[in-house]
Image (cartoon, rainbow, N blue to C red):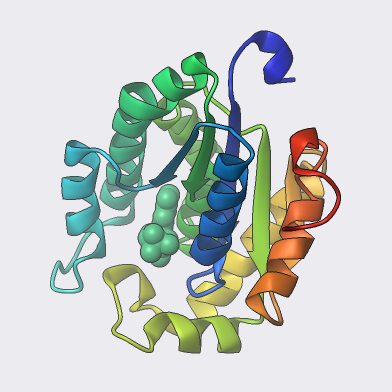
């Protein structure tokens, strides 16, 4: 396990657009910080100057005609920069890294959603992650009609332009990953009040953070 290797802990948060993962990531970071941990909160794509610039291209709804292979490689390029520039050094220091999305999103969106070959996407992920894998991944699961309404309430980014059938394939992609790797990838029911959902997420992480105790504060 991560701690025994003398490094930090790498947590990733996943799910369809509008699943509520970012709010719960903030709650976790606050709680771990209060418990004395160094927490580094990140988003993928993003969180470095280069990766944020790539993100802007990827999400700009005015960018038209991007082919799936280009999209895949831009996500991986942003991730490689984030991984080597920020995530690896943070884990070396012993920090907890909480990252909003990572390679599992690429599997769900570019393979299950866009239809690129799964093997191609797995190989691309190996490069983009520089071989790093999360210690634990939370998939926030929600019916797509609910999550998509939430996601697009204040505007639609380029990835959301394909609408609900695309999001449905993405959701199924995440659930398939969880079935393949049940120890690492935990599905959390994302219905209900924020704190209720946070408590469910917390229960899936508590073995990694014994200092948190059983009850949320
Ligand atoms: P966010 O708004 O949750 O930060 O995510 C950005 C969008 O990019 C979201 O629609 C998911 C999508 N995405 C992919 O299609 N592939 C990826 O590898 C990642 C990380 C995100």
Residue 29 in the image, given as x and y percentages of width and height? 54, 48
In depth, the one of 186 and 92 nearer the eye is: 92
Q: Is residue 143 above or below residue 208?
A: below
| Quadrant placement of the C terminus | bottom right
In depth, the one of 126 and 10 nearer the eye is: 10
**Residue at (70, 49) in percent of width and height:** 177
**Residue at (48, 38) in percent of width and height:** 120
Residue 139 in the image, given as x and y percentages of width and height? 66, 58
| Quadrant placement of the N terminus | top right
Residue 95 in the image, given as x and y percentages of width and height? 52, 26
Q: Is residue 88 above or below residue 62?
A: above
Residue 161: quarter of image = bottom left
**Residue at (69, 18) in percent of width and height:** 3
Q: Exactly how many numbered labels are in the figure? A: 0
Q: Is residue 156 left or right of residue 32?
A: left
In depth, the one of 91 and 60 nearer the eye is: 91
Q: Is residue 6 above or below residue 103?
A: above
Image quarter for ligand 1 equals: bottom left
Residue 128 seen anywhere in this rendered image of the structure: yes
Q: Is residue 107 left or right of residue 142?
A: left
Residue 85 in the image, given as x and y percentages of width and height? 30, 24
Residue 21: quarter of image = bottom right
- Most distant residue in the right direction: 214
Q: Is residue 15 left or right of residue 5?
A: left
Residue 108 seen anywhere in this rendered image of the structure: no
Q: Is residue 203 left or right of residue 23?
A: right
Q: Is residue 114 above or below residue 211?
A: below
């Amino acid at each position: 396990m991560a701690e025994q290797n003398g490094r930090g802990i790498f947590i990733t948060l996943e799910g369809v657009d509008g699943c509520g993962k970012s709010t719960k990531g903030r709650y976790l970071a606050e709680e771990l910080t209060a418990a004395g941990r160094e927490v580094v909160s990140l988003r993928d794509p993003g969180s470095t100057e280069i990766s944020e610039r790539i993100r802007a291209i990827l999400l700009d709804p005015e960018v038209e005609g991007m082919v799936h292979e280009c999209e895949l490689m831009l996500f991986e390029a942003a991730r490689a920069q984030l991984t080597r520039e920020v995530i690896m050094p943070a884990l070396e220091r012993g920090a907890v890294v909480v990252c909003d999305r990572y390679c599992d999103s690429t599997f769900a969106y570019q393979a299950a959603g866009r239809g690129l070959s799964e093997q191609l996407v797995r190989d691309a992920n190996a490069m983009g992650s520089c071989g790093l894998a999360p210690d634990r991944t939370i998939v926030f699961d929600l019916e797509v009609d609910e999550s998509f309404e939430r996601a697009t309430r204040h505007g639609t980014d380029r990835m959301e332009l394909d609408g609900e059938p695309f999001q449905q394939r993405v959701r199924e992609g995440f659930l398939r990953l969880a079935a393949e790797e049940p120890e690492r990838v935990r599905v959390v029911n994302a219905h209900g009040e924020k704190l209720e959902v946070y408590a469910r997420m917390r229960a899936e992480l508590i073995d990694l953070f014994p200092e948190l105790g059983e009850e949320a504060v």
